[in-house]
Image (cartoon, rainbow, N blue to C red):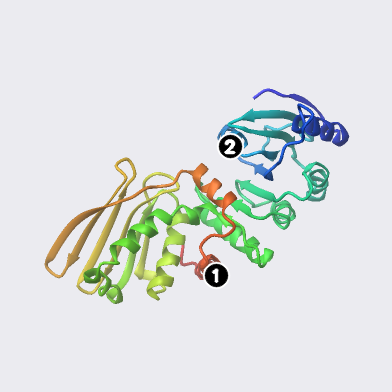
Amino acid sequence: MEGSSAIVNVTEIKRSLDEARCGNGLARTTMMNLIVYNNEPDREEWVAQRVEGVAGKYPTRIILLDGTTLGDPMTASVQPLIGGGSQSEIVRFGIIDCAPQTVRSLLDALTIPDVPEVLWWNGSTVGVEQLFEELARFALPAIVDSSGSSSDVENLREFIDLADALGSRPPIDLAYLRIRPVQEVLAGYFDDSTHRKQLSEIERLEVDAGSLAEAIYLRAWLGRVLHRSFEGSAVAFTRRGQVRRVARCVLAGTGCSYEFVFDEPTHCAHVTAALGKKTHASSLPFVPLDTMSLVEKALLSGRIDPHYREILALVASQLNVGAAQ
């Protein structure tokens, strides 16, 4: 990406954005104001690539807030981006040590009025909680990803607290959306009456996952569906496999055990069911979602799982009693 950089001059940046938006003298419709925040240096290029992907598909004004130590404080660059039949503009800010109110003032000046504002927050909220709240309370929706680092349990705990503070519009956690293919496999398998009648016997849960946020959400969802708490010795989490992925899940109880192994390369979920002395193996389709697909799903859908707030409350109570440790 190329673009000219300068000390922030809001009037000049606004002029550059307006020119980019009306390059041939005709104003173009804009689908949304997308505010993207990143504070993880090793994800800077990853985030930039996905921002370009959104800009190339949907006419968007994108304001990229760089909270890493790599960004120069209070500098900006403006770039028109045309592609895929849409025209978007990207403006970048280095916001190291900027007060949340200063960042909000910049956004108020540079976002397009009467167009939805969406926040895509990348990285931890620890240490920048006030900035997150300042940005998220204007967003419809705010999108976060609590997963993907060695401290993802702490990230999730922080996110749950902030989601509770935001009230009726909780941010969408990509870690929860990411377990949807696993949910579909489990729900589809237990649609079979032979296995469905065993659900009342399930009392233990094992989850292997490359990061724990997905495992915690899966435990909460299964607990809600099966009316089980899965706490203490009834649950076991193992950090294993690809980051941000559930690799294996076991549901077990008196006289029954169901092991699901999620094989992403083959798009198959391999199931081993043990009922008494009988064992049966089978496979089901399994189609994982990449992060960009999840972001697009969150951007374009007005709502997600209607039980999402209930799941958040379950996760909060489990984290409060230390059940995820």
Vertical position of residue 181 compared to residue 71: above or below: below
For this rendering, which residue is in front, 304 or 246?
304
Lateral position of residue 66 relative to residue 233, left or right: right
Q: Label 1 belongs to which residue? A: 313
Kind of residue at disc 2:
Lys
Which numbered circle lies on residue 37? none
Label 1 to label 2: alpha-carbon separation: 35 Å
Task: Give above or below for 46 relative to 124.
Answer: above
Judge the density around disc 2: few (<14), some (14-19), many (≥20) Cα neighbours within 10 Å: some
- Does residue 172 appear anywhere in the picture? yes
Residue 192 drawn at (x, y percent): 25, 67
- Which image quadrant for residue 98? top right
- The foreground one among 203 and 271 is 271
Quadrant into which the N terminus falls: top right
In the picture of the structure, the residue carrying the numbered disc 2 is: 57
Q: Is residue 231 visible?
A: no
Element type at marker 2?
helix
Is label 1 in a helix, a strand or a loop?
Answer: helix
